[in-house]
Structures are given as structure tokens and as C-alpha cells.
Image (tube, rainbow, N blue to C red):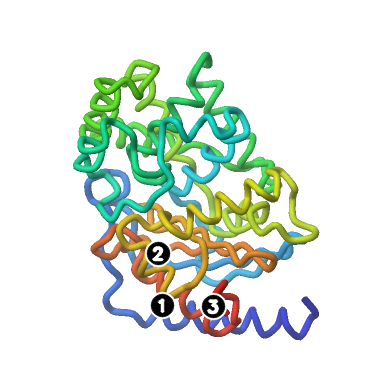
Amino acid sequence: MDALDIARLQGILAQIEHDAAQATDRGQVATYIPELAKIDPAQFAIAVSLPDGTTLTAGDAAVPFSIQSISKVFMLAIALGRLGDQLWQRVGREPSGLAFNSILQLEREKGIPRNPFVNAGAIAVTDAVLAGHQPKDVLGELLRFIRMCAEDDDIHINKSVAASEQATAHRNIALAEFMAAEGNLRNPAALTIGTYVHQCAVEMTCAQLARAGRFLTNAAGAPRLVSPARVRRINALMMMCGHYDGSGEFAYRAGLPGKSGVGGGILAIAPGRASIAVWSPGLNERGNSKLGSAAIETLTRETGWSVFG
């Protein structure tokens, strides 16, 4: 990308940030996790990281936030590296069409979660990675991987957020116990959930998150940390399942693989072009960032980066 294109892209980001600042309906912050309920919904950030690491930002891109379910992308990459296709014996690859924390499908399908991005699926993935390991070792591996992706060692787990999630993890515990009852949880539920809530409490800035996603672009110059074939599969799952029961709407409007988190972050991938991160804490009715989703839709419209042309 030449200097003229970079200047145009920076202008697009500045306009997106300006429009977000004028928005009156910013959605609602996640209140069921007490620490997240304290976050100022007026904050907004967007970052685009090119394959060579050049990163353009606008807004509060240096403010750290809890990435929450975006961490599921990185843990999935670790699980696939460790287990390969054996992982799919424990979790499916289909959209759920239900809320991210629903137990209905899990009961109907005998403890096999529909995909690795709903909570039950991510818990099963974390449980699989835990096999034969201590939680501190798994979390250390996760942090090392994310730091390597971002080329930045200043990425940590927010212990206050983890404790807040642990204290209110009743539904996730129920999901884990149900999977245990069906033979799809190998570790004690408390051990797996404790690891899972710490995983979700990884804290990053928007700029760091955009840089960390570059390995998923499969672009020349981007970090090669996962095989191209596996990158394609992770992106496919992000497109189909990354926004829960709002995944179809996000694909329709943004046209990119993306993974959201209830902390208000979204990681989106423009294959062969860039990794995009956006953060706006207010969520829509599906639990996805309201202004973040609109920002990525605007970005793909202005750049033509949609995978659908």
C-alpha cells in the first residue's frame, strides 16, 4: 500500500471516529459482569494493521480493554495446533442461531456444542487444551501466543475482570456441568471455568488487537504462525459463528470474518489485506458492539474490502 492509499485509509478512520463521537445511541455495556458495567460507553477506537505491521488508528486506540470472547480465536488456534481435527469430535462447526450462552442446543445435541465460539464450545476447547496441563501453564501459553501475534509483550490478564467473571459465572458453570454429564468435559468443571474466565480477561488495546490478528490475513509479510489451510478454516468459522445469532447480519453488512466480545471489541479480518480491530463498549441486543459493527460496515464499504466484492 503506497503513501497515498495509507493517507486515504487514515482519513476513512478519522471520519469513522468522528461519526461515532456524534452517535447518541451507543448501545448498553455488559452489566452481568460487574467490572465491565463500570466501563465508560463514550469511548471508541478503531485500528487497521497492514501485513507488515504498519498500524493506523483513530480514537482511544491506546486504551486497554477486556477482549472477552475474542480470546476464543487465539485459544482455538492453540487447540487446533495441539489436537488437529480430533478437536471436532468434541465441538461442531455450524452456526447456532441462539444466544452465546444458551443451553438449549447443548441439551438437544447431547453435550456437543454447535461451534467453538459460543460459550459452551469455547469451554470445550479450553478443556481440551487443559488436558494434562495446569491452568497457569495454559494461560501462559495463551499469553505468549497473543504476544507473539501482536509482537508486543505488554499484554496481560486483568485479574479484577477475571475475579468479577468468576463470581458471576453461574451459567457458564451450568454449561460445563451439563457437558460433564454427557461425557464432554475431561477436567473438573471448576478448573475449566477458572481457566476460561481468565482467558476472557485478557486485556489489550485496539492497536495491539489489530496487530495480533495479522496472522489470520494469510498475506505476504504477515506473521506465519498457523498454516494457511488452518487460517482459512478459522476465518470461515469467524464468518459463520463469530457474532453468535448476529453472525448472518454482520456478514451481510460487513462482509468480513469477525469475532466479537462483550467487552465491546471486534476483531475482523480482510483476507490478504489487513487486520481490523474496533472497540466501543456499548452492545446491541445480540451482545455485539453496536458502534463497532457499524464502523466495520463503513470501513468495508469505503475500502471495498468485503470478501464478497
Q: Nearer the viewer, residue 70 or 23?
A: 70
Label 2 amino acid? Ser
SS state under label 2:
loop
Q: Count how many numbered circles sit on residues in the image.
A: 3
**From the viewer's perspective, is residue 219 above or below residue 297?**
above
The answer to which of marks 3 and 2 sits earlier in the sequence is: 2
Label 1 amino acid? Ala
**From the viewer's perspective, is residue 146 above or below residue 205?**
above
Q: Nearer the viewer, residue 36 or 142?
A: 142
Instruction: Please name the residue shown 49% across and 36% down the image.
Output: 157
Task: Say which residue label 3 marks.
Answer: 300
Q: Residue 280, which numbered label?
A: 2
The quarter of the picture where the C terminus appears is bottom right
Residue 114, picture quadrant = top left
SS state under label 1:
helix
x and y, in percent, of residue 291 in the image: 38, 71
Task: Say which residue label 1 marks.
Answer: 20
